[in-house]
Image (cartoon, rainbow, N blue to C red):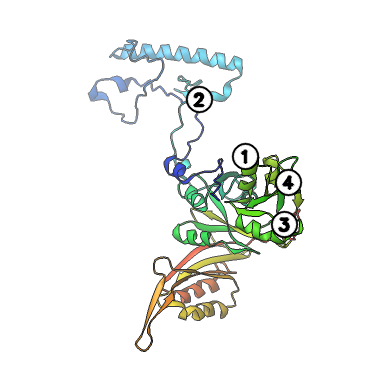
Amino acid sequence: MQSLAPSSSIGIKSIMRTPSPLPNPHRLAFTIQCAASRFDSASNATNPAVSTTKVPSTNYFASGGVGKNRADWQSSCAILASKVVSQQQNTEKTGGADNITVVNGHKTLDLVPVDNLPKPLTITDLSPAPMHGAQLRVAYQGVPGAYSEAAAGKAYPECDAIPCDQFEVAFQAVELWIADRAVLPVENSLGGSIHRNYDLLLRHRLHIVGEVQLPVHHCLLALPGVRKEYINRVISHPQALAQCELTLTKLGLNVTREAVDDTAGAAEFVAANNLRDTAAIASARAAELYGMNILADGIQDDSSNITRFVMLAREPIIPRTDRPFKTSIVFAHDKGTSVLFKVLSAFAFRNISLTKIESRPHRNRPIRLVDDANVGTAKHFEYMFYVDFEASMADVRAQNALAEVQEFTSFLRVLGSYPMDMTPWSPSRDD
């Protein structure tokens, strides 16, 4: 089946071509410097900080209202000042005092009321993204109603969630300043690790700044009026189909299963194409968003179905020791897996608990050759190892452990040191 790319998501090409949006346009304030010395002869022009501004509407300077001598310039200043006063009086009558600026020390309206010009970029536009809890633009993979969107909302309440059609796009959205954060899944309690995102963590230079764990509650969705006996096809994400396989059989749905990019995208596809013979596995929120009915609720085979997401940012956070932290690293060695025991011992001897270890084939050097004159040449896979351990980089034990690990490895990178998700969890739907 062809990939069903959601129409409401961001594509890679659009990100690469579209610049980061500028803030909303603001009115431009025109400041008049009535300094006669600025318009004296060149020998008396001693203030390089004063500059003239070209007025885009009524141009007094180009219409012959200003001469070259001091008297003409002072006369023009008086004319402009009178217009300023009259505009200020009109503003006070209409209650528009919020737009008053300062011109020559007097409170007045903007002389050039231009509403459709963008505000110039300032240093604040290029400053680091706001802290946790502030208004953030958070990228996630999928369409509205996806579990990743729910994870973004749990990680950053009141955030502006930005849907992306691929994991790669979410990474690039943060790197290109289109988003402040990305929230992406890395492992599921039933389906295991999402290897694609582990590879992308190594390819990109984003930092893990937090984690969030989200219970997954699957529903069987269909268009209004459609009953189970009318269905001959069920579509969803591959992991969602696998997580609901036994329940679908118990419901008597021995029908075709087809994989698509994400769960909410499956619901959107059924609704957009009015497919009355097709059901989707997605969340209850997806049913609400796309006007579908819930034929069966909680159809996952295991109620303890939870997905772990990581939050990514352009800059790392400062590690602390006043709360539980977790640190994620990736390393490799030229001599293969022979040093893995030594690396793990560096943590064991310091009583640092490992929460995850994941191996992925080395992309740039996948095969290691071992010469043996008796049996020929042996070939082994080269691996990158991803390790999560329960300690902060501010902890001396973690610093010493990584210093020892560095002695045994040819490559070591800290992906992030971040607070652990300590929120209580139970397999009930309310969580």
Numbered badge on residue 273: 1
Q: Amino acid at mark 2?
A: Thr
Q: Is residue 180 above or below residue 375?
A: above
- Residue at label 2? 101
Task: Label 4: state its secondary structure.
Answer: helix
Image marks 4 and 1: residues in contact by CB distance under 8 Å: no
x and y percent of residue 219 in the render? 72, 51
Furthest-bottom residue in view? 374
Residue at 68% of width from left, 56% of height from top?
216
In which image quadrant can residue 306 be found? bottom right
Numbered badge on residue 230: 4
Q: In the figure, is residue 11 to the left or right of 146?
A: left
Q: Earlier in the sequence, mark 1 or mark 3?
A: 3
Q: In the figure, is residue 43 to the left or right of 350?
A: left
Q: Residues within 10 Å of mark 1 (few under 14, many from 20)?
A: few
- Residue at label 3? 248
> In front: mark 1 or mark 2?
1
x and y percent of residue 90 in the render? 56, 13
Q: How far apart are the two marked residues, 1 and 2, measured between alpha carbons?
A: 54 Å
Q: Is residue 19 above or below residue 296?
A: above
Q: Amino acid at mark 1?
A: Asn
